[in-house]
Image (cartoon, helix red, strand yellow):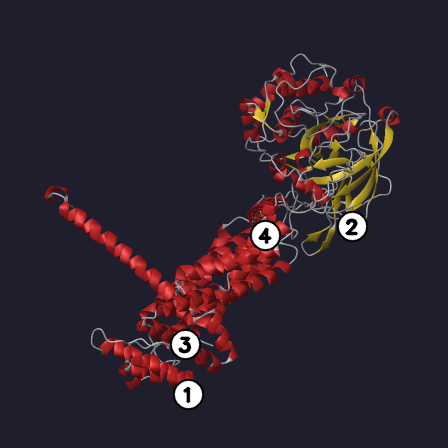
Amino acid sequence: MSGRAKLTVFAALATLLTAWSLSPLVESQAWLLQAALLLAVQSAVGAGARRVPLARSLTVGAQLLVSLLLLALLFAGKVESTGSGPLAYLVTDFGSLFAQGVHDVGEYAIPAPLTDGIQLLLVSGVLLIGLLVDLLAVTARTAAAAGLPLLALYSVAAGLSGGGEASWFSFLLAGGGYLVLLLSEGRDRLAQWGRVFGSAPRGRGAADSGISSGNVRATAPVRFGRRIGAMALGLALAVPAVLPALDDGLLGGPKDGEGASGSGGTISAVNPLVSLQSNLNAQDNRVVLRYRTDSPQQGDQYLRILALDEFNGSKWEASGRALTDVPQQMPVPPGLGDQVRLGSSEVTTNITASDGYNQRYLPMPYPATAVEIGGKWRFEPVGRTLVGDQLGRDKYQTVQGAEYKVRSLLLKPTAQQLQKAPAPDPAIREEYTKVPGNLPPVVAETARQVTQGTKDDYSRAVKLQDFFAVSGGFRYDTQTSSGTGPQAVARFLADKEGFCIHFAFSMAAMSRTLGIPARVAVGFTPGEKQQDGVVNVSMRDAHAWPELYFQGVGWTRFEPTPRSGLNVPDYSRAQAPTAQPSAPAPLPSQGAVQPAPAPSVSAECPPALKKLGECGATAPQQSAAGDDWPSVATVLGWAAVVVAGLGLPLLPLLWRSRLRARRLGTGEVLAAWREVGDAAWDVGVAPDEALSPRRAADRVVDLGRLEPDAAAAVHRVAGAVERALYAPPGAEVAYAGLADDVRAARAGLLAAAGRPARLRALLLPRSAARISWAVTARRSALAAAASARLTAVRLRLPLRSRG
């Protein structure tokens, strides 16, 4: 194996070993094998292009083109097509899957599930780094600089994974691969000067060779490469220590509730608010939950995930609480009195989660009384939440693809019951009325101004709700930058625009300043009912709302967000029973619908919903004969793609055939002689321009191992060349069988070569290097012409204008 071939192998190996550092980011390492195979093909294409040889730009272009085609074939059918023809397949659908991967990166916690989008990002990222390493280390012969893309890959992986014991093993793999690459490049450089020795001898031999006695001194390029390598390895150690550990989603914040203690384990999972704003702005509007319910008030069927009950001065989060086994019958909700409980009814909801919804908390109606679900789940009694248990190292039970049944209470408190609610339990009041010391005074002042003149907590709560939803002049806007800290509440009160997070957090904070126990619930609005009675809950139904505590009723939902389609609870309409949000957003209704709404199904189901089978039943339509046939444009487009795919490897063969026909068609002796030289070059007999025609013919016959007939043909062509070069003007130098002799010589050269060499001569002819030579010569000629023209223009300028 040649030195450059070894360098190609070690460049790919270094990239693959560094890519191992990405493995902690996802649950499965199946993508690594795919990346290795595609990286091997990409490196092989580069090695073949350099062997031809091709220009550097053409080599990189060939590698990039083959990699893109392989990625397109590998991920074919992974996303529902939104168009027809090869352009939609190679551009639109491929880009849609890439965008889905970017969305999934922000959606899932580490280790994330290996979705098709995330797999595309990982494989394409490794291929891109591999292309850069191959370009720097092999094509440009600067292996030391190839450590920079390797450093970038390792630093990103180490920063996202947050370090740990596995990071040291990943660092050793990445560093070892880079050092082997440097060693291979160094040995290849030394091998170009002759035999490689380990070191020069001490004494006279060392002095004679110009190497200092005692310690062997490395040459300047080697020392420079070592310095770059040492710097890259040092940065690889330092950068991950500086980067923050992003544990809450691949691009999220810190985990909520970690570090809390308690019997039976504690809540330690991702905060669902990480991607709430992106879900509300999502264009694909993926359906994540489907359910059927016997509730007569489907518009009040909010699916609650968990409650954020701790406001620590920087954000709202779920406090760490002890988890227990899931009881068959859940206890009575805290604060719920007999009067309200006896007036309630129990409803049953059957829920199915999509395979793309990977949430550790179980969405349920509140308050649930019993849950039937498979898998390992734990129960948090205070928030009445089910949390997925740990299944293994860095792996937890999730709701992904689950089918479960929830029985819950449909509470019907009245405004009078809430208004006459006694004072809450002192422990409840103490825990859920805490506010951070750095809360801006404007929050409490605004709460007192809004609720001025009220005499009970219920009236204050309704005043706050109406202030945000009706009278305060607030505007719903999902593009507002999200924030959960104290200053974010003050900014929201001043700017008066935001989305559900801002409204829920602000009302909860203001309620706490008034002595009303409050927390924030996160989940989904009721969704949209379909023709078959199934309710679809999509990503844009994600929502946050405040829950306030009233003794005898328990935690009670309020709705301060002025968004069209949200169902304001009846018990909170005492002050303004007919009020509607004053400035609803111009978005389509994604929240609750009124009870028993008419089924709503769009005329065309979005592709993302088709893939999940979430479009509901549609009336069968009779299609006309021939409607299933693809269009003419689609057939022609796919035919063009097939022809291009098959014709790409045949381009060198077609070029040589065309060039041969043109040379022999002219009848010129020198053109025919160049064809003989190129035919010999294609089978491995490199041209030697210093030889005379007769000596060159002898060399072709000897090295090409030609038979007598083919050898005689070569000598006849060489004789015609000598006559063309030395005969007097007007002498006849060409002869009738010139083209036939060239073809006979080429056939003899191919016959004498082995099968691999013959295939190489046909499919990848060495003489194709003349293309890069011609391009380089043309580029140099254009540059020289442009330089000469600029010089001429400058000389024509007056002396004052020069310089």
Task: Identify residue for label 2.
Answer: 376
State the mark number for residue 638: 4
User: Is 229 displayed left or right of 366 in the figure?
Assistant: left
Q: Which comes sooner in the sequence, label 4 or label 2?
A: 2
Which amino acid type is shown beneath numbered disc 2? Lys
Secondary structure category for the residue under label 2: loop
Q: Mark 3 or 1 closer to N-term?
A: 1
Dot 2 or dot 1, earlier in sequence: 2
Which residue is label 3 attached to? 740
Query: What's the amino acid at mark 4?
Result: Trp
What secondary structure is found at the residue carrying circle 1? Answer: helix
Percent position (x, y) of residue 41?
A: 54, 65
Q: Which residue position holds label 1?
A: 708
Query: Which tag, 3 or 2, sits closer to the chain's start?
Result: 2
Can residue 751 be seen by looking at this rendering? yes
- Quarter of the rendering containing residue 607: top right
